[in-house]
Image (spheres, grey):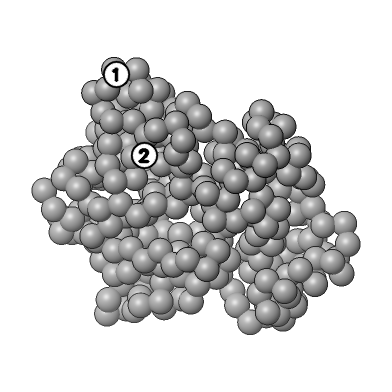
């Protein structure tokens, strides 16, 4: 089995530029034919696999470039900048995005931990990394092909879909991203839980003490582990999540005041100052200079 066969399959299923939501819940195929510089985005827990072309995500200044040799595993919600700098009609970006179901991933991670050492588990001192690049190993490639091959038969999707998704999740948990994925979804996932709380309450205000208390850690330990997982301090992370969310809303046509309120800013002037500090332009200037194609991963 090779990624070439997966490329041929996706090429047949996505003939035009855009994103296709498949009959498999949480599985999207995409073809991108326009070069897009990196722009603010929020990555939710998911795996993104590229079969043709190159994609880039930037987290706190660190670039993650991936293609048909390595896939990106996002273990928890992350404020990134993402783009397709090399895509063109002649050389389109082709790929698949698969959302990671928290319940299923957690069940599998716990089952693996209870398998009495059948698979080496991460040490307790390890902290999950928010973004991980992992090689396309044989098990991941086989599981991905088996999953996507269902899409050509609606009955196969209904009957076999959940089982094939579980098979792919298991391949991810065993593969190059496995240490971080097992830690993020299994026992000891305090940082992932804190990030989930923030991402689902983006319009609320959080202090480090609030976040640490939610997961039963001291302020100092929480701050250290959070930065290990995300490369950012908790406060910097929250600000990035808010501003990236706002930038996406502006790109979708929302006005500045509404976008500021949606992400929890009481003062539009403070929002504008912090937005300009991060992106180099005022919110109004930025929304006029860049439109993010909604839905493209």
Dot 2 or dot 1: first in sequence order is 1
Q: Nearer the viewer, residue 27 or 68?
A: 68
Which residue is denoted by mark 1 in the rendering?
115
Q: Secondary structure at mark 1?
A: loop
Which residue is at 48% across, 76% downward?
Answer: 37
CB atoms of marks 2 and 1 within 8 Å:
no
Image quadrant where residue 118 sits: top left
Indicate the position of residue 200 as horizontal and vertical percent values.
66, 41
Which residue is at 70% across, 80% downward?
Answer: 281
Image quadrant where residue 145 sits: top left
Residue neighbourhood size for the residue with mark 1, other residues' Cα within 10 Å, grouped as few (<14), some (14–19), many (≥20) = few
As drawn, 266 above or below 147: below
In this picture, residue 255 sits left or right of residue 222: right
As drawn, 275 above or below 246: below
Determine which of the numbered discs, if any, sits on residue 156 in the image.
none
Real-space CA distance between mark 2 and mark 1, rounded to the nearest whole angstrom: 16 Å
Q: Nearer the viewer, residue 209 or 288?
A: 209
Q: Nearer the viewer, residue 250 or 211?
A: 211
Which residue is at 15% across, 59% downward?
Answer: 4
Residue neighbourhood size for the residue with mark 2, other residues' Cα within 10 Å, grouped as few (<14), some (14–19), many (≥20) = many
Indicate the position of residue 84 as horizontal and vertical percent values.
41, 71
| Residue 222 visible within the image | yes
Indicate the position of residue 62 as horizontal and vertical percent values.
47, 66
| Residue 16 visible within the image | no
Which residue is at 67% across, 57% downward?
Answer: 236
Q: Report the quarter where the C terminus lies.
A: bottom left
Determine which of the numbered discs, if any, sits on residue 179 in the image.
2
Q: Nearer the viewer, residue 74 or 8?
A: 74
């Amino acid at each position: 089995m090779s990624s070439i066969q997966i490329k041929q399959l996706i090429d047949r299923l996505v003939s035009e530029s855009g994103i296709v939501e498949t009959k498999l819940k949480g599985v999207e195929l995409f073809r991108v034919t326009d070069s897009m510089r990196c722009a603010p985005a929020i990555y939710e827990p998911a795996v993104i696999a590229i079969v043709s072309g190159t994609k880039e995500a930037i987290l706190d200044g660190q670039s993650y470039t991936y293609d048909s040799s390595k896939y990106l595993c996002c273990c928890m919600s992350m404020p990134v900048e993402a783009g397709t700098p090399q895509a063109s009609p002649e050389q389109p970006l082709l790929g698949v995005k698969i959302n990671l179901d928290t319940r299923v991933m957690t069940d599998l991670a716990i089952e693996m931990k209870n398998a009495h050492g059948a698979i080496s588990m991460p040490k307790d001192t390890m902290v999950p990394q928010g973004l991980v690049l992992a090689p396309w190993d044989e098990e991941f490639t086989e599981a991905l092909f088996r999953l996507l091959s269902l899409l050509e038969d609606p009955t196969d999707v209904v009957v076999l879909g959940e089982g094939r998704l579980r098979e792919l999740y298991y391949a991810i948990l065993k593969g190059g991203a496995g240490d971080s994925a097992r830690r993020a979804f299994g026992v000891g996932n305090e940082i992932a839980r804190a990030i989930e709380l923030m991402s689902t309450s983006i319009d609320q205000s959080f202090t480090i003490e609030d976040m640490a208390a939610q997961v039963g850690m001291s302020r100092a330990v929480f701050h250290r582990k959070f930065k290990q997982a995300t490369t950012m301090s908790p406060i910097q992370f929250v600000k990035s999540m808010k501003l990236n969310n706002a930038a996406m809303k502006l790109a979708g046509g929302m006005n500045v005041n509404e976008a500021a309120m949606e992400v929890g800013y009481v003062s539009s002037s403070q929002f504008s100052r912090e937005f300009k500090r991060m992106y180099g332009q005022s919110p109004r200037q930025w929304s006029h200079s860049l439109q993010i194609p909604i839905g493209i991963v």
